[in-house]
Image (cartoon, coloured by chain):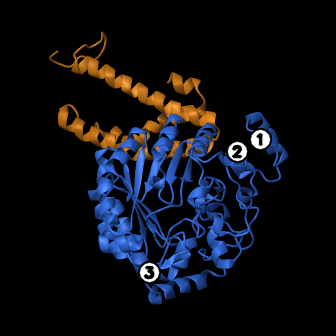
Chain colours: A blue, B orange
């Protein structure tokens, strides 16, 4: 790799030199917010976990000093906000220290947590350290289903308790609800639960199928009718709860006509850092096999963002094949999701089959329909042992 | 006005980001003014009613603009500082109004309510 050039004059010179294909990294700058997956350890075993199938063990995690260095570097290159995520970020004993450091270097901090490991004292310590926002995941609105999905007895009740502490400590709260065939019927109750917990925001996120979720697709895939009902419920609630609760909605794109603008375009607005320090264009990027992802241990984050092959590979539109290459929407959705394209076609540069223009679209639509009708409800739980079949 | 005139367009636009917090405030302001001032009637409120629509539109434009144009650490810091500056201006205005009309120290030349 060439040496770092960060000042504006050098950057302008480089842009002129590389004018054949201007780097999207330079036109967007470093992302405003970065997702830090500080550990893959987690007491929950959700079958749709967004972590990779090959989880990184505790021994491989960045040390406290390494994470602090990462936080300082992020602030110095213009990042404004960090999400502490995982795995379960509170499984890190040094989380308060890391949040304090993020605050000290001027970063806005969000905690994305399952909540089940938190005590009130620890949450208060995080608030004192400058934590600015808490996002708690819920697997349902009642313990029977929620605790089964999370594979953790007593989890739902604990989440409710932590959500109340969050508001008592005057921290803004987002409720995150990952939705699938086995809990979509609870959506109206989940919306009411978010209101009752005094959340500002609710994420209704239908499962996206990579990694663990792809392995569990037959147990999770909703029916088309469920999705239509879900959309209607969300839209009505968005109207009814204006000014009370903001609802963000992620649809399952197997049933969509247009693919999602995944990550706002590969390498243009987002990166995340894995427990061992790998810098990834999206948290599922490692599902694309045969790609190397550089680590914060090897190079500066700014250099990785601008120069790493893993980021430049699918930046912009130059990498596209047909039907994307000549498509009028190519800069609207950037051909959809690279990880999904790889998972379903074996080629990460193919059109995401979620797009109606993909030759595979019809087939995945039918797959979704048939798995929703006939798939077994039995989960493969996420864990370090490569997964455990429910009830086995 | 000096700030907008003298600073970069990026900072000028960033200073309008207080509009992000305005929609709810405008609604409260309209109902509050109608309730508390007998010289205020719904016709007079047309400016604020228009702002209910305009403020979110302006705020979304400004937020999108600064996100797209502030790409260096220095530019992002300038955006944040412009917003902080604007909130300080609004804070100072509220302090001045409180001092004049709540504490009763109306400065020379300022509006004097009837009966004072």
The answer to whether A193 is drawn above or below residue A372 in the figure is above
Residue under label 2, please give it.
A300
How packed mark 2 is, by other alpha carbons closer than 10 Å (few <14, some 14-19, many 20 or more), is some
* Whether marks 2 and 1 lie on the same chain: yes
Determine the residue positioned at 59% across, 33% down: B9
In the picture, residue A175 is in which quadrant?
bottom left
Label disc, if present, on residue A344 of the rendered structure:
none
- Residue B65, x across and y down, in percent: 57, 43
Q: Is residue A268 left or right of residue A4?
A: left
Q: Nearer the viewer, mark 3 or mark 2?
A: 3
Q: Nearer the viewer, residue A264 or B116?
A: A264
* Residue B100 in the image, given as x and y percentages of width and height: 27, 17
Tell me if label 2 and label 1 are in contact, CB under 8 Å. yes
Which residue is painted at 47% across and 62% down in the image?
A: A42
Crowding around mark 3 (Cα neighbors within 10 Å: few <14, some 14 to 19, many 20+) is some
Q: Which residue is mark 1?
A: A4
Q: Nearer the viewer, residue A346 or A111?
A: A111
């Amino acid at each position: 790799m060439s040496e770092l050039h960060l000042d504006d004059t050098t950057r302008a010179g480089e842009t002129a030199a590389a004018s054949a294909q201007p780097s999207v990294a330079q036109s967007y700058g470093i992302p405003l917010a970065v997702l830090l997956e500080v550990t893959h350890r987690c007491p929950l075993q959700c079958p749709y976990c967004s972590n990779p199938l090959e989880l990184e063990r505790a021994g491989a995690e960045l040390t406290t000093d390494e994470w602090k260095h990462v936080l300082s570097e992020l602030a110095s290159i213009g990042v404004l906000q960090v999400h502490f995520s995982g795995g379960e970020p509170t499984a890190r004993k040094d989380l308060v220290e890391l949040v304090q450091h993020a605050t000290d270097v001027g970063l806005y901090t969000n905690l994305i947590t399952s909540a089940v490991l938190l005590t009130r004292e620890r949450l208060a310590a995080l608030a004192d350290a400058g934590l600015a926002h808490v996002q708690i995941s819920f697997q349902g609105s009642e313990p029977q289903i929620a605790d089964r999905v999370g594979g953790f007895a007593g989890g739902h009740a604990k989440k409710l308790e932590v959500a109340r502490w969050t508001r008592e400590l005057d921290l803004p709260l987002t409720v995150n609800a990952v939705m699938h065939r086995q809990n979509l019927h609870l959506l109206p109750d989940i919306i009411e639960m978010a209101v009752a917990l005094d959340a500002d925001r609710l994420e209704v996120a239908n499962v996206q199928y990579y990694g663990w979720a792809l392995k569990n697709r037959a147990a999770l895939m909703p029916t088309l009718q469920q999705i239509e009902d879900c959309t209607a419920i969300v839209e009505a609630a968005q109207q009814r709860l204006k000014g009370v609760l903001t609802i963000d909605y992620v649809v399952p794109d197997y049933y969509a006509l247009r693919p999602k603008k995944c990550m706002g375009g590969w390498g243009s607005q987002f990166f995340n850092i894995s427990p061992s320090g790998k810098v990834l264009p999206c948290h599922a990027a490692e599902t694309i096999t045969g790609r190397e992802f550089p680590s914060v241990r090897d190079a500066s984050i700014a250099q990785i963002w601008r120069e790493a092959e893993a980021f430049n590979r699918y930046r912009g539109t130059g990498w596209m094949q047909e039907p994307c290459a000549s498509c009028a929407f190519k800069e609207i959705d950037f051909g959809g999701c690279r990880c999904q394209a790889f998972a379903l076609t074996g080629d990460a540069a193919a059109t995401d089959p979620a797009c109606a223009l993909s030759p595979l679209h019809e087939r995945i639509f039918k797959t979704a329909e048939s798995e929703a009708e006939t798939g077994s409800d039995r989960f493969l739980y996420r864990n370090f042992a490569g997964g455990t079949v429910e009830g086995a | 006005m000096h700030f907008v005139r003298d600073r970069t367009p990026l900072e000028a636009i960033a200073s309008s980001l207080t509009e992000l917090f305005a929609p709810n405030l405008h609604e409260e302001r309209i109902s509050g003014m109608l309730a508390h001032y007998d010289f205020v009637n719904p016709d007079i409120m047309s400016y604020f009613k228009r702002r209910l629509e305009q403020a979110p539109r302006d705020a979304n434009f400004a937020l999108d603009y600064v996100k797209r144009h502030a790409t260096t650490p220095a530019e992002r810091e300038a955006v944040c500082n412009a917003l902080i500056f604007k909130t300080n201006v609004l804070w100072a205005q509220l302090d001045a109004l409180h001092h004049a009309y709540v504490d009763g120290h109306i400065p020379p030349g300022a509006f004097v309510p009837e009966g004072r």
